[in-house]
Amino acid sequence: MNRSLRIAVFVGTFPVVSETFIVRQIAGLFNLGHSVDIYADCRAEPNTPIPGEVEKHRLMDRATFMDMPPESAPWEIPVWPLTGRTWPPGAEKSVHNSIRFARVIPKLLSCLKSHPALTMSVLKPSEYGYQAKSLSALYRLAKLTSMRRQYDLLHAHFGPIGNSFRFARQLWKAPLIVSFHGYDFSTFPRKHGGDFYVKLFATADVITVNSEYTRLQVEKLGCPPSKIQKLPVGLDLAEFPFHERSPKSGEPIRLLTVGRLVDIKGYEFAIRGYAKLKQRHSSLCYDIVGDGPLRQKMEKLISELNLQNSVTLHGARESAVVRRMMDGAHIFLLASVSIDGDQEGQGLVLQEAQASGLPVIATQHGAFPEGVVAGESAFLVPERDPDAIAERLAFLIEHSETWPAMGQRGRKFVEQNYDIHKLNLQLAGIYEKAIESYQRTD
């Protein structure tokens, strides 16, 4: 593509450590000569580690936040003490999100003046469901119309975000691409209904998926196969220097897991598998990077198994710190499990580990088998099986001579399939075709 594109990227919260891959993709678009603006529903919580790429590319200067008042509890409308009736007569006795209602009037009038049909659309529950009832859709429309910008292409990350901002396709008269990554094709539709994405699939021009497994799940949700294109999430190989692993006399063998402390990551089984092996290999230690709602539960489990001196919960860490920890590790473990049928998508951290030369142990889960070379760069084990985890760990510890070959195979696999520079060029091609198709049909 020869010309510079004006691109709007939509996300939920920005910036998020666990979504550094989005930041890398945006940085890649800048490097290709495109202009990118970021639209996010929420700002990151205070004290959240900021990915270095955000500061490097000054992405906060490119970010616009919706600044919606928080949803509030019902506000009771006054009732006449004698009659028991509300004022005004006939009104309901409670109103949800009263703060939003109070502040939305000038935004509503402005949107009705500039885009009357689109404004009425985002207020219809039949079109935008709870986003209409809670006025979230109207607040988003008001913010976007106030920017007075135009774009060549719109790109939303995660299905629910694409659904929330799909009106932007009509507002800015540009094709819409939506990327599905994980929870959006599993947990979310299970909670909100299998038909949640019907209107999104009808509106979006292209749906990208990070694996063949994700493609299958998105098709099951009703997306036309012709709209789906596979685009794995990539990584900058220069940020993951390769080196062969080997144990050093007198130093511990370091096992590493990176991922949020949530049920689907299978930490309980990883820790129990490690505990079985710790009795035989006293030099083994386990570093866990990530935070989440299960932290206290995992701390309790570590204490119950008497592993406080060898298992460390490091909490969330900025991506540069994670890369340094990968560089110092010997084996990578990811023991994710299905939760009520929900599974993860690509599992980018598996590619990061392989790129750095780490032998990998992972579960037969979601798209994980696509993201490693089973039996060559990684060992796959059944879900929820601490014994299998312990067995594969024992093999790797007792056969450290296999580490260099596993690391080399993993690095080559990632270079061939997950190089972000190659994938950004592929993304640019998807953009070009989407724009050409949009211009022919709209």
Image: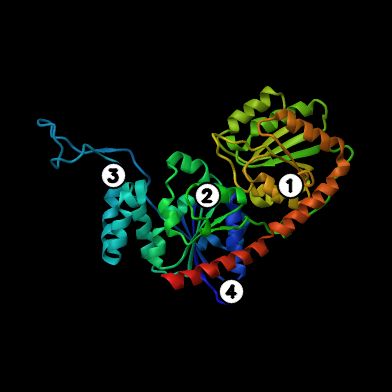
Which residue is at a point 78% across and 35% down the rendered structure image? 392
Q: Nearer the viewer, residue 122 or 215?
A: 215
Q: Does residue 40 sit above or below 313 in this rendering?
A: below
Mark 4 crowdedness (10 Å alpha carbons): few <14, some 14-19, many ≥20: few
What is the spatial separation of the Cα atoms under label 2 and label 1, in whole angstroms? Answer: 32 Å
Could you give the CA–CA distance between mark 1 and mark 3, rounded to whole angstroms? Answer: 49 Å
Among the 4 quarters of the image, the one containing residue 332: top right
How dense is the environment of label 3, judged by Cα within 10 Å: few (below 14), some, or many (20 and up)? some
Whether pointer 1 and pointer 3 mark residues with C-beta atoms closer than 8 Å, the reply is no
Q: Which element type, helix, strand or loop, lies under badge 1?
A: helix
In the rendered image, residue 298, in percent from the top left (x then y), is placed at: 63, 30
Observer-side mark, 1 or 4, equals 4
Mark 2 neighbour class, 10 Å CA radius: few under 14, some 14 to 19, many 20 or more: many
Q: Is residue 269 above or below residue 376?
A: above
Q: CA distance from mark 2 to mark 3?
A: 37 Å
- According to the picture, the residue beneath numbered tag 1 turns out to be 326
What is the spatial separation of the Cα atoms under label 3 and label 4, in whole angstroms? 48 Å
Three-letter amino acid code at the position of disc 1: Met
Residue depicted at x 67% and y 57%: 235
Check contact, mark 2 vs mark 4: CB within 8 A: no
Q: Secondary structure at mark 3?
A: helix
Color encoding of the figure? rainbow
Query: Disc 2 marks which amino acid?
Result: Val
Residue wearing tag 2: 218
Residue shown at 56% from the left, 70% from the top: 34
Q: Which residue is mark 4?
A: 1
User: How far separated are the C-alphas under marks 2 and 4?
Assistant: 29 Å
**Nearer-N-terminus badge (3/4):** 4
